[in-house]
Amino acid sequence: MLDTKGLRCPLPVLKAKKALRDVAAGGILRVLATDPGAVKDFAAFCQTTGNELLRSAQEEDVFIFDIRKSG
C-alpha cells in the first residue's frame, strides 16, 4: 500500500509510478490519496501505461485506487 495522503497533483501519480517498479506483473498496488484531482490523474495514468485500474473509490475524504500492474 502506498499512502500519498496530503500530497497534491502530480505527486500521488509519480510516487505510484515509482512504487509499481517493485510490484510483480499482475500484482496490485493500493494507493491512498486526498487530492480530488487524483481521480482523473489515476484514470489517465492507467490508460496511458496499460495498467488496470481495478478500483477507484472514496471513503470519507480518502480516495482509494487499486492498480494491477500490466505485463
Image (cartoon, rainbow, N blue to C red):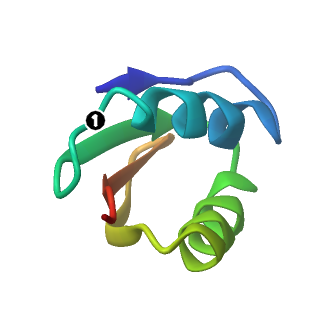
Image position of 37 (left or right of 48): right
Q: Secondary structure at mark 1?
A: loop
Q: Is residue 57 above or below residue 22?
A: below
Q: Is residue 25 above or below residue 18?
A: below
Q: Is residue 44 above or below residue 59?
A: below
Out of 69 and 33, give the one closest to the viewer: 69
Quarter holding residue 70: bottom left
Quarter holding residue 12: top right
Q: Please tell me which residue is depicted at 31% across the width and 64% down the height of the picture.
A: 71
Q: Is residue 15 above or below residue 29?
A: above
- Residue 48 at x, y = what percent? 65, 75
Q: Quadrant of the N terminus?
A: top left
Image position of 29 (left or right of 60): left
Residue kind at label 1, given as amino acid type: Val
Quarter holding residue 34: top right
Q: Please tell me which residue is depicted at 82% across the width and 40% down the height of the picture.
A: 10
- Residue 14 at x, y = what percent? 70, 35
Image position of 3 (left or right of 66): right
- Residue 9 at x, y = what percent? 82, 41
Out of 30 and 24, give the one closest to the viewer: 24
Out of 9 and 58, give the one closest to the viewer: 9
Q: Which residue is mark 1?
A: 23
Q: Please tell me which residue is depicted at 28% across the width and 35% down the height of the picture.
A: 23
Give the farthest residue toward the bottom: 47
Image position of 50 (left or right of 27): right
- Residue 58 at x, y = what percent? 40, 56
